[in-house]
Amino acid sequence: MAVIEARGLRKIYGTTVALDGVDLKVEPGRILGLIGPNGAGKTTALNAMLGLIPYTGELRILGHDPWQERARLMRDVSFIADVAVLPRWIKVSQALDYVAGVHPHFDRSKAEGLLQRTTVGRERRVGELSKGMVAQLHLALIMAIDARLLMLDEPTLGLDILFRKQFYDSLLTDYCDGTRTIVISTHQVEEVQHVLTDVMFIDRGRIVFQCSMEDVESRYREVAVHPEQLGTARSLKPISERQGIGRNVMLFDGIERARLAPLGEVRTPGIADLFIAIVGGRQGGVQ
Amino acid sequence: MNAPASLPVPARQFSPWRQFCWSVRREIWENRSAYLVPLAVGGLIVIATAIGVMNPSPRSNVAPFEMVAQNHGIETPFIFASLLLMFSTMVVSVFYSIDALYGERRDRSVLFWKSMPVSDTVTVLSKLTIPMLVLPLITFVVTVATQLVMLLIGMMGSGSGLWAHLGIGKMWWGELFHLVALHGIWWAPFWGWFLLASAWSRRAPLLWAILPPLAISFAEKIAFGTSHFAAWLSFRFVGGMEGPPPANPMSTAMLMQQSPAGFFLNPHLWTGLAMCAVFLALAVRMRRERGPA
């Protein structure tokens, strides 16, 4: 059974189409990056999957309809909506007590262990903690829940670079076990790239690209083209071309390494460059 | 491909009752005014009583313990204290229930609460329990403690006769009945309405709670020159305790104009509870549909 299955998922706010017929299937154990510019519909898509907003179309999370069965689903799905959603008045010890009280899949000793590695004091209130410490607390609570699906919506927004790195390292080493599925929405592509198994670009409510990371590596190549090879390179129809330092950098889809090697240095493109090539191209070169 | 993932997770689950109890605890953690306000008012009453006993004046309302002999008005300071405590609790209850479902959206913490497997129904019911049961019981306990200290202070001033003449058991029963029956159960439609206004409002829940009833009253007055709606509201506010007016307003009799049997047999009590149920059902719906403010 797929963890997430959506067909023709639509959400309209007034006259704004936030999700315009999204089809999506995520298998167990994948770590999917949902990448898109601000306002592309990432949060709307996640909120629909979490049962926080109504939608039209078909959507099944672990076989359940999230809008009808949010409470039931939350036993197996956890999410961090935003770093700033832990209530400011709650004490760290109270947060542990409460989650242990209401969540049947919460392992309190695991949360305590994760918190031990941080400087978050047990008797502090969330309002007294720094932004990074609140994120550590929230991550400790969520990672101690034995869930099958974890959704993270811009989880590191506003955190400094050290915390961001720790956040993803912790997620990989303490949470991922090959069977849990994770969906991470972000517009900061670079820092999640090494974590993902799959990537999906969303733009103006539509999924414009989806691919596993292995396929990205085998299909897409970026070439810093020698000036004298420009003509030959362009005849191979690069999907994008940009100015690098002293070289034109072209991105090719499905052209073998052997044919590209004579044109210049070949490498695997970063997700950010791929994103700009695909989404930027769709936007008619506005960016 | 991943065999373990496709195996069903053992269906561990907690009963809604357990989640409800934790949700009520959570409300008390968040709203410390639920016990701090009654404690502060009780403390003030005790201090005022002590000062009153030390400086007896013939016109003093707080220390008429010298009336012991007449056995008349002896309850007055005690009832006055309990009314003060009840009033402060009512204020706390109103502000609590108007903020209960709005505040969590305003500070976006609703996104954390909704990431827990607790249903909207359990959450809304736990929030209703605070004004309907928790605050009346806290107030009762603080009232009893306050009155015990007042009694001790009074006995130091007037001797043990006070204890003999004051029907304290009857008074406490009257206070408990008044708090649970009137503040909790009879006012249930108000608590339900406030929770609905709280769940509904995108901003200014206080206005949503208060303006619609006011607007209906004014519209009726202007259109028909009548005030049935206002009369109905006022009945919903004080009607449950109506009975023959007691001779002394500051007495246990005032708290128990209605017998428990009469109170529970009153059909208006049950129509009020039905109204409360409708408001709550709508509040549950609104909590599900409204995102963070």
Image: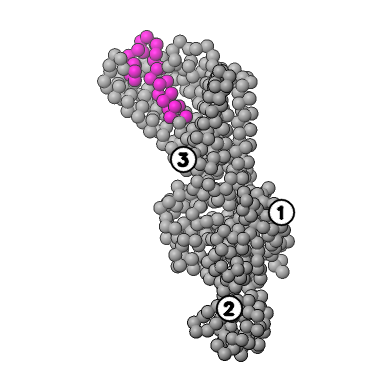
For the N terminus of chain A, the image quarter is bottom right
* Residues at discs 1 and 3 in contact (Cβ within 8 Å): no
Q: Which is nearer the eye, A142 or B211?
A: B211
Discs 2 and 1 share one subunit: yes
Q: Which is nearer the eye, A66 or B68?
A: A66
Q: Mark 2 points at which residue?
A: A241
Specify the segment rendered in magenta: B61-90
In this picture the colour scheme is one colour
Does B66 appear in magenta?
yes
Identified by mark 2, the residue type is: Glu
The answer to whether any part of residue B144 appears in the image is: no
Between tags 1 and 3, which lies in front?
1
Q: Name the residue under label 3.
A: B31
* Mark 1 neighbour density, 10 Å: few (under 14) some (14–19) many (20 or more): few
Q: Main secondary structure of the magenta part?
A: helix
Residue B128 numbered tag: none
Q: Is mark 1 on a helix, strand or loop?
A: strand
Give how far apart the Cα atoms at labels 1 and 3 are. Answer: 41 Å
* Residues at discs 3 and 2 in contact (Cβ within 8 Å): no
- Left or right position of B257 against B278: left
Residue B260 coordinates in the image, percent (x, y): 57, 20
Q: Mark 1 points at which residue?
A: A57
Picture layout, residue B113 above or below residue B284: below
Give how far apart the Cα atoms at labels 2 and 1 are. Answer: 38 Å
**Which residue occupies 41% across, 34% down?**
B37
* Residues at discs 2 and 1 in contact (Cβ within 8 Å): no
Does A278 appear in magenta?
no
